[in-house]
Amino acid sequence: MKLKLLTVLLLLVMIFSMAAGCGKEKNNTIPDRTYDEGEILAAATDLIPKTAVFNFIFWGEGIPAAEEPFTFGKYAEADGTWLEEHGFVSVSDVREKAGEVFSASMMRWIENTVLTGVQAENGYVSIARYLDYETEGSSYFMVNPDAKVYVTDSTEYDLDSLQVLGSKGETVKVRLDCTVTDKESGEKKTVSLTVNLFEEEAGWRIDSTTYQSY
């Protein structure tokens, strides 16, 4: 009797051990990717400075309105001189060029919060900050002058301080120093910034925000 009981207990232990092992196998995380450090540093050096104008457009003071703009609802025509100086002709153009810098995941977030807008389940509505508007054969780059500004301080990147921290899953992390200037006082401070990079079919892309506040 004792032998049978011991046998049953051993079988139960084996069954639970196998089940636990299967569960662990199913929950395995994506292994950390390998990478070439020189390639990562080159990609970060190229991409991070390109995010500055998009930080301004998406989360900063934004593209200014023209002095005497064409208007449509709460939207006003964008300042054509600013657009020309920065090489943008339409909202679609901004979207396309941002997609050459940011990952698809980041672009989905930018799309929903800035470029298109979205209504959440709780009823909160995010209004598009920019839109392309056509009327009577004319096309207009429209801006919302009342859009919320999240970032007012400027950030300068010290690319010489770039270092690769390592990978986590499919993401590679780099760190660099940057100088943040307070808009109100003009005071500066140096902070450390960690940036994620993600490799897509078209190449490396920034997979995090790159702005800082004083």
Image: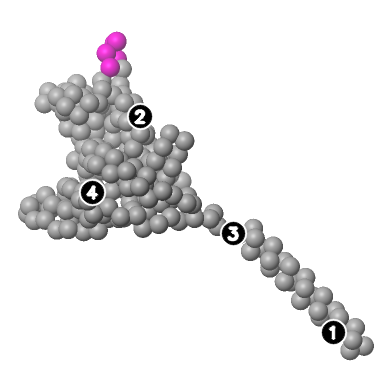
Give the residue pinned by disc 1. Answer: 6
**Could you tell which of marks 4 and 3 lies nearer the N-terminus?**
3
Indicate the quadrant containing the C terminus: top left, top right, bottom left or bottom right.
bottom left
Give the distance between the C-alpha atoms of the residues marked 1 and 3, in whole angstroms.
33 Å
**Could you tell which of marks 2 and 1 lies nearer the N-terminus?**
1
Q: Relative to the observer, which residue lies in front, 39 or 85?
A: 39
**Could you tell which of marks 3 and 2 lies nearer the N-terminus?**
3
Q: Which residues are magenta?
A: 135-139
Give the residue pinned by disc 2. Answer: 96
Q: Relative to the observer, which residue lies in front, 22 or 35?
A: 35
Give the residue pinned by disc 3. Answer: 28
Residue 100 pos. (x, y %): 35, 34
Give the residue pinned by disc 4. Answer: 159
Mark 3 residue element: loop
Which residue occupies the extreme right position in the image?
A: 1
- In the displayed structure image, the side of residue 90 where residue 145 appears, left or right: left
